[in-house]
Amino acid sequence: MDAYRCTLAAKGPVTKLMRACLERAGLAVTSVGPADLTTAACDADIVLVDVDQFGNTTLSAAADVPVIRMTSRPEELACTCGREDVCLCRIGLPFSPPALVMRVRAALAAAHGVPASPPSGDIERLTLDLCSGSGYSTCEAADADGPGTLVIGVDRSPEVLIEAMALARLIGYADVAFVAADVLALPLRDGSFNAVSGEAEMDRWVGDAEALTRAQAEVRRVTQ
């Protein structure tokens, strides 16, 4: 992502954190106010706008580049700026820095295209990503684990996993895979995984304390 230029239209302390996250990911970031948004967007590859502060009206004048809209108000997450083609995604505030970077990568890939990454080589480790949803956490785990690790995301919704596979392919992650399964009955061999991510989130997805205990037992069964 070194060559990509990002216009960040946001104010307040969170702007400094967003800028640091994006620059760490290799983007050249320009922070602007409302008066400078249109001009800066013309020179950008992607635009991030805090619509709580800037509103939706500024977006209609921006250049024809991908736009990520950020808001703390759920009702604002629907794209109402009249530019459905470039409103590629929305981010709720407060945000997760890894999720922000992952969504920017996805938006850039969809708009500009990125070459798919080949598998990193021999697989030495397996990481299980629980309740992986649309795949952002699985890709984040792959970044954290580095070369030689295959990260397998598990979610009980096949429809969501179709989106996850498309996302991973779009961004260029080759060392990730997905399995449709219930965390209460994982179709995986005993002791087959070296590490697990997402275990702390399981209580959000299982129904009660008894189910959580069963899920935790399943995770212990498939990890070394």
Image: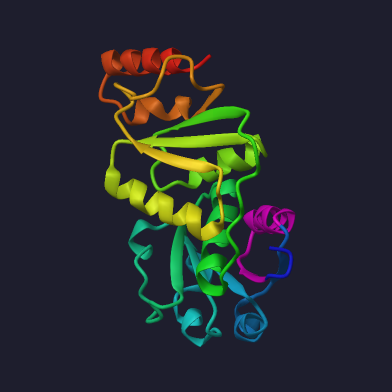
Q: Position of residue 209 (x, y in %)?
A: 30, 15
Give the farthest residue toward the front: 122
Q: Is residue 211 visible?
A: yes
Q: In the picture provided, is 222 more to the left or to the right than 174?
A: left
Q: Quadrant of the N terminus?
A: bottom right
Q: Position of residue 196 (x, y in %)?
A: 51, 25
Whether 82 is drawn above or below 217: the answer is: below
Q: Position of residue 198 (x, y in %)?
A: 47, 30
Camera-side residue: 38 or 173? 173
- Magenta highlight on residue 70: no
Give the image's coloring scheme.
Answer: rainbow
Camera-side residue: 165 or 131? 165
Whether 2 is drawn above or below 92: the answer is: below
Whether 35 is drawn above or below 211: the answer is: below
- Residue drawn at (55%, 66%), measured in percent from left and top? 109
Camera-side residue: 67 or 109? 109
Whether 124 is drawn above or below 55: the answer is: above
Q: In the picture provided, is 158 more to the left or to the right than 14?
A: left
Q: Hey, which quadrant is residue 184 in on the image?
A: top left
- Magenta highlight on residue 7: yes
Q: Is residue 49 visible?
A: no
Q: Position of residue 71 (x, y in %)?
A: 46, 60
| Range of magenta residues | 5-25
Q: In the picture provided, is 27 more to the left or to the right than 111?
A: right
